[in-house]
Amino acid sequence: MSGQSGKVRLRLLNTPFLHSSSRNSTKFIELTNDDFHVFMLSAIDENIRAKEKTSFLLKKTYQCRQCQTKLETQREQQHLFEFNLSHVEVPVFQVQIEIPAVVCPACGVHNVIETPTLASDIIEAQTEAFLSVPNL
Ligand SMILES: [Zn+2]
């Protein structure tokens, strides 16, 4: 399953439950509504996003999600993140998301800086991925 929106490419792997006609998978398919989008968004956030700090002058700065080093936000490059996700309704599955990110100068971990279109791009890529499944 894959989908794309803006600079975001999303692939979901190892999701055979979406193709089966068992009761459980029907349940999962029903989750391709807002609830599942919210679940996916927060799970993706946790796995890729830089930490945000807002100063008392409302200036936003970003820190590495792993080591808290301050990040240079203008050095974004496309990066492929891969991680496993689990949801109560289904077995563990894999997520691959290609998205602009900055590398932490201290520990080398990639971090995604939030943009105004980040969430909507992720949701649209996700919707396209779900729609790419036959008979959904
Ligand atoms: Zn770091």
Image (cartoon, rainbow, N blue to C red):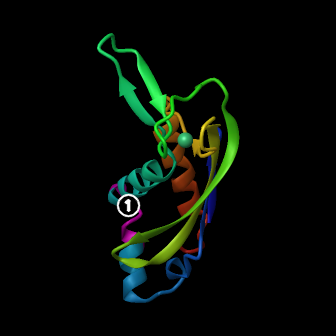
- In the rendered image, the residue lying farthest to the bottom is 22
Q: Which stretch did the figure color magenta?
A: 29-34
Q: Nearer the viewer, residue 78 or 57?
A: 57
111 over 43 or under it: above or below: above
Q: Give the x, y percent position of residue 39.
A: 37, 58
Disc 1 element: helix
The residue under the point 60% across, 46% down is: 109
Asked if residue 128 is among those painted magenta in the image, a careful observer would answer: no
The residue labelled by disc 1 is 36
The residue under the point 37% across, 27% down is: 53
124 over 26 or under it: above or below: above
User: Is 36 left or right of 121, judged from the image as shown?
Assistant: left
User: Is 95 left or right of 60, judged from the image as shown?
Assistant: right
The residue under the point 51% across, 29% down is: 70
Q: Is residue 136 visible?
A: no
- In the rendered image, the residue lying farthest to the top is 57
